[in-house]
Image (spheres, helix red, strand yellow):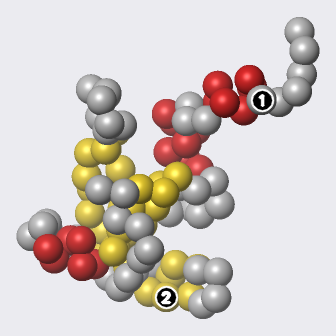
């Protein structure tokens, strides 16, 4: 599975074809507008899935909004990046600051 960590979106996103191909249950009670770079679309619902980094045992449950199509299998938002402290070390090490 390929996932894009993106600091811009407010929502975690997954494409409908991934849900269908894996026979995953869709909760269609929560449908929201999803703003993309060129247009706004309506999600088909949500699904909650566990996410883990390759080679790690920590699981993070993510509520994903299902959209008709997407370039990646999953797009994880800034809330995920903050909760998992993703990129923190890289940013600090490459910031150019000296202690």
Q: Report which quarter residue 64 is drawn in.
A: bottom left
Q: Is residue 39 above or below residue 50?
A: below
Q: Which residue is mark 1?
A: 94
Give the camera-side residue of 53 and 10: 53
Residue at image point 29% right, 56% down:
1
**Lateral position of residue 24 relative to residue 40, left or right:** left
Where's residue 33, x and y in %? Answer: 50, 82
Where's residue 62, x and y in %? Answer: 35, 50
Residue at image point 55% right, 42% down:
81
Instruction: Work out which residue is located at the far top of the displayed protein and give it.
Output: 99
Where's residue 99, x and y in %? Answer: 89, 9
Circle 1: is it few (<14), some (14-19), or many (20+) Cα within 10 Å?
few
Give the camera-side residue of 23 and 90: 90
Circle 2: is it few (<14), some (14-19), or many (20+) Cα within 10 Å?
few
Q: Which residue is mark 2?
A: 41
Q: Report which quarter residue 71 is drawn in.
A: bottom left
Where's residue 18, x and y in %? Answer: 24, 71
Instruction: Decide which of tag 2 and tag 1 comes sooner along the chain.
Output: 2
Residue at image point 74% right, 25% down:
92
Residue at image point 39% right, 62% down:
74
Q: Is residue 75 visible?
A: yes
């Amino acid at each position: 599975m390929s996932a894009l960590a993106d600091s811009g979106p407010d929502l975690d996103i997954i494409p409908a074809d991934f849900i269908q191909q894996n026979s995953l249950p869709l909760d269609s009670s929560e449908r929201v507008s999803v703003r993309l770079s060129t247009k706004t679309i309506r999600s088909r619902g949500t699904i909650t899935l566990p996410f883990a980094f390759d080679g790690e045992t920590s699981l993070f449950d993510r509520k994903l909004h299902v959209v008709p199509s997407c370039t990646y299998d999953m797009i994880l938002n800034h809330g995920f990046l903050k909760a998992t402290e993703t990129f923190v070390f890289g940013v600090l090490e490459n910031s150019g600051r000296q202690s």
